Image (spheres, rainbow, N blue to C red):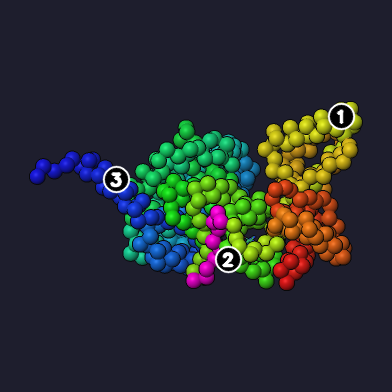
Amino acid sequence: MPRRPATEDAEHRLLAKGRALHDRGVIVMKFGGTSVGDARSIRQVVEIVRQQHSRQPVVVVSAHAGVTDALLAMAASATGGGADTGAIAERHRTILRELGLPADLLDPLLAELQDLARGLRLVGAASPKALDLLASYGERCCARTVAAALRAGGIPAQAIDAFAAGLRTDSAYGRARPLPDDGRILHALVAVQGVPVVTGFIASDEHGNITTLGRNGSDYSAALFGVAVRAEEIQIWKDVDGVRTADPKLVPMAKPIRSMSFEEVCELASFGSKVLHPAAMVPAMTSGIPILVRNTQEPAAPGTRIEATAVKDRPAVRAIAHRTKMALVTVSSQRLVPQHAFLARVFAELHELSADIGPVAVSEAALTLALDEATAEAALTRLGALGEVRIERDQAVVGVVGDPRAIEAGGAAAVFAALSAAGIPVRCGGQGAPGGTLAIVVPSSELRRTVTLLHERFFA
Ligand code: ADP
Ligand code: ASP
Ligand code: MG
C-alpha cells in the first residue's frame, strides 16, 4: 500500500485527535500561583493531573506565587537604574533543583529576561507594552517547569505559550481583551503531544506583541481555553477549598459554598472578591460550561461548583465580598451648568480613564464615588477642571451579596444597624439593581471589623 506523505499523516492524526477530543470530552485544569508556588505544590499538581489524566486535561498555569509582582517591581527599579534578575532566576532554578529537573532548563528564557532588564535600564522607562513582555516570563517559565515535572512523573506533557496556542487580544497592554477565536486554539492544542501546559494571563495581539489580560487574569485564560476546546468543565485549582462566605484571610470561620450560579459569582467578583477574576465567568456562562473551584492542598474536598442553573433554597445572603486600596473622590459643582450636564462631564472624564466605579452618591451639587487608588489619583487633575475635588484615601468597599429582595426587605437596614452599633462610619453606599449587592465604603482601618461583623450577622 502506498504510504501517505508525512504532512498528510500528521494532518490525519490531528483530525483524529480533534474528533476524539470532542467524542470523549476534555477538561481544563487551571493552577494558580500558590498551587505552583514551590516544588512541593508542583508535585501535588502532578498527582492531581495524574488522577484525571484519562479526561484529557488541558492544563493552564499562572506564574509561581510572587513572581509577577517581582517582575513588575524590577521594572520599576529598572527605570531608576536598578533591575537585577538574579533573585528571580535563582527562584526558578531552586524550584527546578528541588523537583530533580535540570537546573538549566529555563536558561534560554532567563537570558532573554536579563537582556530585557538591561534594555529597560538603558532606556530608563518601561512602556505598558514592555511591562507586558516582562511580566510574560513568569508564566512562560512556570509552564515549562510544570510540563517537565509532569514528564518526570511519567505523564507525557508539553509546555505551550498562549500566543502559540492561538490566544489573540487587542493591543490594550496591561488589560487586553480577547479577539474572537476561529478554531485556531483547538487546532493548536490538538497538535500538542501529551498534556498541553498552557501559560495563563498572557496572549499576543495581531502584530505578534505579547499582551496580558490584567492582574490575576489566568482564571480568565482558563475560561477562554475551556470555551475554545468546548471543555466539559473548567477546574480552577487554588489555595482555598472553593468560594467561601467571606475571604478566609479576614474571616477564618467563613464557610465553603458548594454550589453557586454564574450570576452570583459575577456579582461577588465584581464587588472585589479576589477568589475569581470577574471576566472569567462570562465565556463559561455563555457556553454553559460549569466551573469548579478546588483546593490543591485538599484535592478530596468538593470545592464549589458554579453553573447556570439557579441554586435551590439559597440563603438570602450568599457572601461578604471586599475590595481594598480604594479612595473616595468628591467633586463639587461650581453650579455653572445644570446638574445633569455636570454629572455627564464627570462620567465622561471617568470613561476616558476606563475607570471601574464603586458606589456612587449624588447630591444636588456634588458627587462622591469610590475608585481604586490608582484611578482616583489619575482622576484628580481631570476632575479638577469641573469643580472642587476632594480625595479620601485608605478606603475599602464591602459588598453584601445576596438576593436583592431579601436585601431590600430588611437586609440593608440590618447592615446599617450592625455597623452603626459598632461605631463604624459608612461613608457611601448603595444597592445596584438588578444585582443583589449592597455595597458600602468604610475606612481601611475598619475593614476586618466590618467584614467579621457582617459575616457574624448573616452567617452565625
Ligand atoms: P490563585 O492565585 O491561586 O488564582 P488567588 O490568590 O488569586 O488564587 O485567589 C485565592 C484567594 O482569594 C484566597 O487565598 C482567599 O484569600 C481569597 N478570597 C477572597 N474572597 C474569597 C472568598 N469569598 N472565598 C474564598 N477565597 C477568597
Ligand atoms: N501571574 C499573574 C498575576 O499575578 C496572573 C495570575 O496569577 O492569574 O497577576
Ligand atoms: Mg491569583
Q: Amino acid at mark 2?
A: Arg
How far is disc 3 from disc 2 in space, using C-alphas? 38 Å
Q: Could you tell me which quadrant the C terminus lies in?
A: bottom right
Place residue 245 in its image quadrant: bottom right
Q: Residue at x 79, y 45 (%)?
A: 360
Q: On the image, numbered disc 2 is attached to which residue?
A: 258
Label drawn at residue 338: 1
Q: Residue at x 78, y 38 (%)?
A: 380
| Closer to the camera in the image, 298 or 259 | 259
Kindly indicate whether the residue at mark 2 contacts the one at mark 3 (C-beta within 8 angstroms). Answer: no
- The answer to whether residue 282 is above or below residue 407 is above
> Is 307 part of what is drawn in magenta?
yes
Q: Amino acid at mark 3?
A: Leu
Q: On the image, numbered disc 3 is attached to which residue?
A: 15
Badge 1: residue crowd in 10 Å (few <14, some 14–19, many ≥20): few
Badge 3: residue crowd in 10 Å (few <14, some 14–19, many ≥20): some
Q: x and y percent of residue 332 in the render?
A: 87, 37
- Earlier sequence position, callout 2 versus callout 1: 2
For the record, the magenta segment spans 300-309
Q: Amino acid at mark 1?
A: Pro
- The answer to whether residue 27 is above or below residue 253 is above
- Earlier sequence position, callout 1 versus callout 3: 3
Q: How many marks?
A: 3
